[in-house]
Image (cartoon, helix red, strand yellow):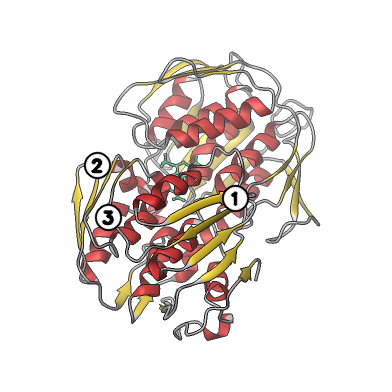
Amino acid sequence: MSAPVPWPAPLARRPVDATVTVPGSKSLTNRYLILAALAEGPSRLRAPLHSRDSALMVAALRSLGARVREVAGDGDFGPDLEITPIPPESRGLGSSGGLGEVAIDCGLAGTVMRFVPPLAALSRGDIAFDGDPHARVRPMGPVIDALEALGVSLSSPDGGRPTSLPFTVHGTGSVPGGHVVVDASGSSQFVSALLLAGARFDEGLHLEHVGKPVPSLDHIAMTVSVLRELGVEVDDSVPNHWIVQPGPISAFDVRIEQDLSNAGPFLAAALATRGTVRIPNWPEHTTQVGDSWREILPKLGAEVTLDGGTLTVRGGQRITGADLAETSELAPTVAALCALAETPSRLTGIAHLRGHETDRLAALVSEITRLGGDAQETADGLIIRPAPLHGGLVRSYADHRMATAGAVWGLAVEGIEVEDIGTTSKTMPEFPQMWARMLGQSAGEQGSSSDAPVPNETVKAP
Ligand SMILES: O=C(O)C1=C[C@@H](OP(=O)(O)O)[C@@H](O)[C@H](O)C1
Ligand SMILES: C=C(OP(=O)(O)O)C(=O)O
């Protein structure tokens, strides 16, 4: 494959002033897709995400026998999805009996590599999982171990016990379930993966976490909330224990909220350019971690208001550093701002970012340092001190959030290029066009500086 052409990040010579709508939430889209495949009848996702991670999830569910159809909807970023659940035949419960051999590509999607194997265990067939080169080093062991402890058979291509991708799930059409202990300190997705399928295990699931604290707890709260909404009984009243009663999952018709984590780089543009960015339709109640931009951005010097459903972020005269804990998937965008701040920052509670799309702590330190900044890794996060950045190539590490961090730096620092802006297709394929529009440019003018951001420019689907 030829190397990607570096993307000249547009410089903002004036404060941005834009209204931005972002595509649907990855975390909600992929949770609802899993649950639609297990539900009692056909379901509909309105305004879902259409990106590499959601396409991989759709392909995986189709391989397991679910029917997923695109139908016209009113979303700004593509059609709705109608899902007919995995039929009894695929689960080996009908006369034709089972799927045979199936291959599932996880790409680099944590939600696919962690959430789909429990579904495969509920199908009948040999279901082989693999993904991008880096997916093979993302932590996976706790899901594999838990499935084995719950009565599922798995093997690696060499015939031994797998610890990571690639592996094959030998599904029998049912999972006994019951009590299982996992160490979920490496990823909240280990917990979510098992909870999402737990209601379809014969005895349900009693999942217990033992180990260092589970990260990204907001994402587990999202899983529990979505399950309850679909009639699944979940008890999470005791810390580190989740009990899912066996039972049906209701079919549904939901509208997917926009991805508040992916709103981050656009909101960051307000701080990086001392401008204003508005996001309409900010959900009144949400389980998305991105809602915490409302607490994070004021600490970095912005004025943030939520009025009539529109979030407005106004950058201050300077970005101030801050001590911020457990910023989860928001951390790369937060770190991008901290590297532009006039006072030091300390990010804590994000050791598990080492197991994300890339080792994000190492990647952020490398890229900030290479641009002349001052960043250092700690055991569980980063220290970033003020230092002027200069232009240069920001490596993207196949990580959408490293690519968008580069775009944020490029607004404020002349001569930034991003190695592969195409990696944003993992969750936001429209990013380069949306960024250019935010700056009042057409997509064809990318790379030139933005002399005249258009006041009240409205950014929607390209
Ligand atoms: O369940 C989810 O949808 C996610 C959980 C989090 O994973 P970690 O717990 O591994 O951080 C988050 O970072 C990821 O982007 C999405
Ligand atoms: C960690 C992330 O993704 P994944 O779902 O692949 O874990 C992310 O999007 O920041």
The Cα atoms of the two marked residues, 1 and 2, are separated by: 35 Å
Indicate the amino acid at tag 3. Gly
At x 53%, y 79%, the residue is 453
Q: Which mark is residue 321?
A: 3
Residue 1 sits in which quadrant? bottom left
Residue 240 sits in which quadrant? top left
Answer with left or right where residue 12 lies relative to residue 319: right
Whether residues under marks 3 and 1 lie with C-beta atoms below 8 angstroms apart, the answer is no
Q: Which mark is residue 307?
A: 1
Residue at numbered disc 2: 380
Q: Position of residue 287 (x, y in %)?
A: 55, 37
Q: Is residue 192 visible?
A: yes
Q: Position of residue 457 (x, y in %)?
A: 61, 73
Indicate the amino acid at tag 2. Asp
Mark nearer the N terminus (3 vs 1): 1
Indicate the amino acid at tag 1. Asp
Task: Assess disc 1: are there few (<14), some (14-19) or many (≥20) residues with their C-alpha within 10 Å of its C-alpha.
Answer: few
SS assignment at label 1: strand
At x 35%, y 56%, the residue is 301
Answer with left or right where residue 221 lies relative to residue 310: left
Answer with left or right where residue 395 lies relative to residue 222: left
Q: Nearer the viewer, mark 1 or mark 2?
A: 1
Q: Is residue 100 visible?
A: no
Mark nearer the N terminus (2 vs 3): 3
Q: Position of residue 319 (x, y in %)?
A: 32, 61
Mark nearer the N terminus (1 vs 2): 1
SS assignment at label 2: loop
SS assignment at label 3: loop
Q: Nearer the viewer, mark 3 or mark 1?
A: 1
424 lies above or below 46: below
